[in-house]
Image: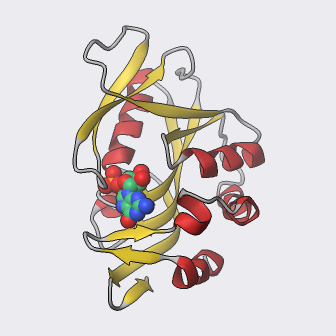
Amino acid sequence: MKLLEDRIRKDGKVFPGDVLKVDSFLNHQIDVDFISQLCLEWKRLYEGTEITKILTIEASGIAIASVAALHFNVPLLFAKKTKTVNISADVYTAKVESYTHKTTYDIIVSKEFLKPCDKVLIIDDFLANGKALEGLIKLCEDAGATVAGIGIAVEKACQRGGDLIRSKGYRVESLARVSSMSVEGGVEFC
Ligand code: 5GP
């Protein structure tokens, strides 16, 4: 999506370790009107697909996913990160390896909010190695819910996550796909 690519070219900052920061409009300060336009693109792409719930992971996915939920007119559910050792029986849980912090944590959602009848659109800000998505997909599988699709704002296609998740048969709609990036050279798109 040219709109997002242009904004990343203008405002994105590349950091060592293949980290792209978009703090001025998506991850810290939020340009709500701008991310609303991104969400409308997912709405167009998933026209005709039944969606009953949007699922994301805290914290950075929540802003964009909540605007998506507004456009799809469905509830937003976000998986919480937890360090609790004793996980209650009332939640579905998965382990996720953090791309940015290089640690592993548990994510949980309450069984009350994810049901076998749900058709879930998973939304996240970034896709790198696919660990966050694998965790969110596991939560849906454990609940017996259907993953109707996945919407990603920025896919770092130079990393393996997109191929991995698509090879499992999931539909992944990424609005910008980064083919390469470097601190010196900036960002290139597929
Ligand atoms: P994955 O689990 O696919 O390896 O990484 C995706 C998660 O890590 C996303 O939820 C996102 O929060 C974070 N992430 C991965 N790469 C980047 C990046 O380049 N920039 C930012 N801001 N977050 C990233």
Which residue is most to the top?
Answer: 89
The percent coordinates of residue 123 (x first, y second) are: 54, 49
Residue drawn at (73%, 45%) of the image? 72
Q: Quadrant of ligand 1?
A: bottom left
Q: Is residue 67 above or below residue 29?
A: above
Residue drawn at x 58%, y 28% is 118
Residues 17 and 175: in front is: 17
Which residue sits at x=37%, y=80%? Answer: 179
Q: How many marks?
A: 0
Q: Classify 96 as above or below 87.
A: below
Residue drawn 65% across and 54% down? Answer: 46
Image location of residue 141, percent across then percent down: 40, 29
Q: Position of residue 169 (x, y in %)?
A: 38, 51
Q: Nearer the viewer, residue 30 or 177?
A: 30
Answer yes or no: is residue 127 visible.
Answer: no
Identify the image quadrant of the N terminus.
bottom right
154 to 10, vertically: above or below: above
Q: Could you say which is closer to the camera, residue 89 or residue 185?
A: 185
> Can you say whether 188 is above or below 111 in the image?
below
The answer to whether 60 appears left or right of 20 in the picture is: right
The colour scheme is secondary structure
Quadrant of the rendering where the C terminus is positioned:
bottom left
Query: From where the camera sits, is residue 70 visible?
Result: yes
Splitting the image into 4 quarters, where does residue 175 fall?
bottom right
Relative depth, front residue between 106 and 121? 106
| Residue 173 drawn at (x, y percent) | 53, 61
